[in-house]
Image: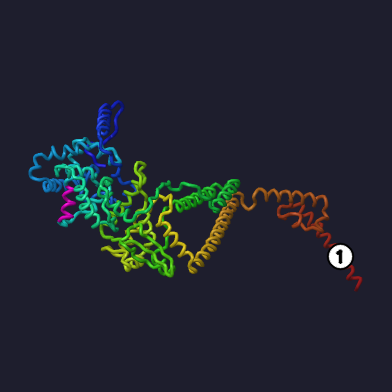
Amino acid sequence: MASINPFLGPNSGDKAWVDQISKTLKKQLAVTIDTPPVSIFEIPKILKEENLEAYVPQRIGLGPNHHFQPELYQKMEQNKLTSMKRVLKPHQFQNYEDQVVEKIREIIPIIRACYDLYLDIDDETMAWLFAIDGLFLIDQLGAYSDHQFPIDAKDFIMLENQVPLIVLKEIKTTLSGGINVKAQEDYWESKFGFFCKAHSPFLLYEEKMDFSRVNHLLDYMYHSIVNNETLISTEVYFTNPGSGPSEKDIKQELLDIFIQIIGLIPLTKPFLQIAESFKKNLSDSTKKEATVEEIKVPSVSKLHNIAGVKFRLSPKNGGIRNVKFILEKERFCYLPLICVNMDSEVILRNLIAYEKLMANNSFTSGFSLELTEYVDFMCGIIDNAKDVKLLRDEKIIMGDLGDEEIVKLFNGIGRSHGNMKMGSELRRTVRQLNEVYENTPRIWVQRMAEKQLRGSVNIITFIISISGTLICIREVYMKVYGSNPPHIMLVHFVKTILSRSLLHRFPRLSLHFPAAILSVSPSLLDSRSSQHGNMEIGKSKGARWGEGSQLHNKSD
């Protein structure tokens, strides 16, 4: 936030800060007018990182957030002073400070309450700042509605760039010389209404707005869009990403058991680290899937080509609440008109940001996430240019943007992280569309095949992972102990001792059991034992050969 004297925080015993806070509090307590809710917010950093130019004015800086930005100040300050001259009548020039600045100075405590951050700017500077920006905005809106002069809609509609309506009302009342509530309401209805009808992506509420509840220009556009059809308001609760109970994945359970087993085997620390890393990646992937907050719905082309759903424009100039699915002889999905042009992304982003921040503000009520849900829905059903063309052919999408640009617009806006406590009409429509799509024979068979294949792939992947790890463990084990690990060497040693003992005590035993049976490795036998065994075997063979020859001679 830009300010003349940046607030660095008080030091210990800083009396100047105590005096300033005490003075501010006394002024705010002395105000008898109802304090409006906080309605001008600093855009969260995460949204600005998505698209900075959609939230920060590029040409016109209004209010304490951007009035003193160097580039904007140099470009527009003289234009603002010129606008003041056009709004003020000749006889008001001399008394401008007494008539306008002084009146705004009196309501500075109320103005401060409209911002979510503490404004460390003195009352005098604030009064002049809002007098200049208020007169400039009145001049621009008047010139635009009366003479159709061009206006920089993007900068005027940005949330951080809003001027509280209470400032504009105070200036208008002062310049008109009195208070006429009906005249005031009609005036702001004509100026705000003309601007919003020209730049709103959606059709607006036809009834007149209660300006006692309007916070600023963006607030007027938001309520004109959402209130286009009266429905029961739904409350909103916010959840932190990843919060809430979830069932443990079977793969994670098996992996936990496997890691415990590896931990019991010596010299497997490298593989234990690999398994832990794999577990972390699996956990992060599961958590990411569980925290994605979006409306899951097939695209327009899939619903049309596979499920036979026909899309039609909602009748009677409906708004975002007029999303309906009708299943009779034919399947129809009715959607409201949306008109997109070069400024639409900036307007949509700031409207959604305003809705989320107001809904998340504990001091405000009556804000749901209807607009955010609708934009999420459009992001879900628009995947490619074919989807846009189908909707454009039915006059549901209109405007100057090309099909590919519209796809980029909806796929570029971030998803919501808020959930509805009660089922909204849009949610019910989404469930109906999903049921119709999933119950088509083609998709049903496809889902069954995918389910079976997914289960097989998971099992095969797990078996391969386990097998590969065990092979790696064996390789490490063999490298450390060689081809004769301790337990194998012990077996060889015992067998060798037994073989020696048996051959020494029972030399003729080798006649019936060869050395290969008595010992796993004949090379391990003692050389003396081997020679002795060979001699005995030779004698036996000689005796048999001798006997054989004698028999042969006798036969002769």
Residue 481 in the image, given as x and y percentages of width and height: 61, 49
| Extreme residue toward the bottom, this view | 556
Image quadrant in which the N terminus is located: top left
Q: Is residue 364 magenta?
A: no
**Majority secondary structure in the magenta region:** helix
Answer above or below: position of 357 versus 343: above
Horizontal side of residue 309 vs 213, given as left or right: right
Residue 456 visible, this angle = yes
Q: Residue at x 41, y 64 (%)?
A: 326
Horizontal side of residue 504 vs 352, given as left or right: right
Answer above or below: position of 377 versus 164: below
Residue beneath disc 1: 546
Residue 184 in the image, given as x and y percentages of width and height: 20, 47
User: Which of the 4 image quadrants contains residue 91?
Assistant: top left
Of 507 and 162, the residue lying toward us: 162
Magenta-colored span: 136-146
Horizontal side of residue 79 vs 487, given as left or right: left
Image quadrant in which the C terminus is located: bottom right
Of 456 and 431, the residue lying toward us: 431
Of 526 and 159, the residue lying toward us: 159
Q: Residue at x 43, y 49 (%)?
A: 421
Q: How is the image coloured?
A: rainbow
Q: What amino acid is labelled 1 in the image?
A: Gly
Residue 68 in the image, given as x and y percentages of width and height: 20, 43
Q: Is residue 138 magenta?
A: yes
For label 1, count other residues whose C-alpha is less than 10 Å away and answer few (under 14), some (14-19) or many (20+).
few
Horizontal side of residue 210 vs 521, given as left or right: left
